[in-house]
Image (spheres, grey):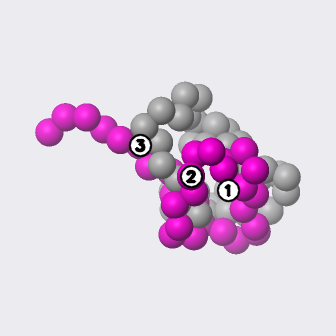
């Protein structure tokens, strides 16, 4: 299936979860300080391993940055 991850179209396995997308496509091994939105709705971190996006969905992966 195809997803739009941080404004980039990506092909992913049909069984991919949000956790897979964060790890494999966003390149984040340790998801500390990371938030995910699926089609504009925040996905709680506790649900990442069970939440499966559908073909054409948009995922935004955001990381907190300290500083100013």
Given contact means CB atoms under 8 Å apart, are the residues at marks 2 and 3 in contact? no
For mark 2, what is the residue?
44
First to last magenta residue range? 39-68
- What element does badge 3 sit on? strand
- What element does badge 2 sit on? loop
Nearer-N-terminus badge (1/3)? 1
Q: Image quadrant for the C terminus?
A: top left
Given contact means CB atoms under 8 Å apart, are the residues at marks 1 and 2 in contact? no
Please name the residue shown 57% across and 70% down the image: 39
- What element does badge 1 sit on? strand
Nearer-N-terminus badge (1/2)? 1
Would residue 50 be counted in the magenta stretch?
A: yes
Nearer-N-terminus badge (2/3)? 2
Magenta residues, dominant SS class:
loop
Please name the residue shown 67% across and 39% down the image: 24
Q: Image quadrant for the N terminus?
A: bottom right
Q: Is residue 44 visible?
A: yes
């Amino acid at each position: 299936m195809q997803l739009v991850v941080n404004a980039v179209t990506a092909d992913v396995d049909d069984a991919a979860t949000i956790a897979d997308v964060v790890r494999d496509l966003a390149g984040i091994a340790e998801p500390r300080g990371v938030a995910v939105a699926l089609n504009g709705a925040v996905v709680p971190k506790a649900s990442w391993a069970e939440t499966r996006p559908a073909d054409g969905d948009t995922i935004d992966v955001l990381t907190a940055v300290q500083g100013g």
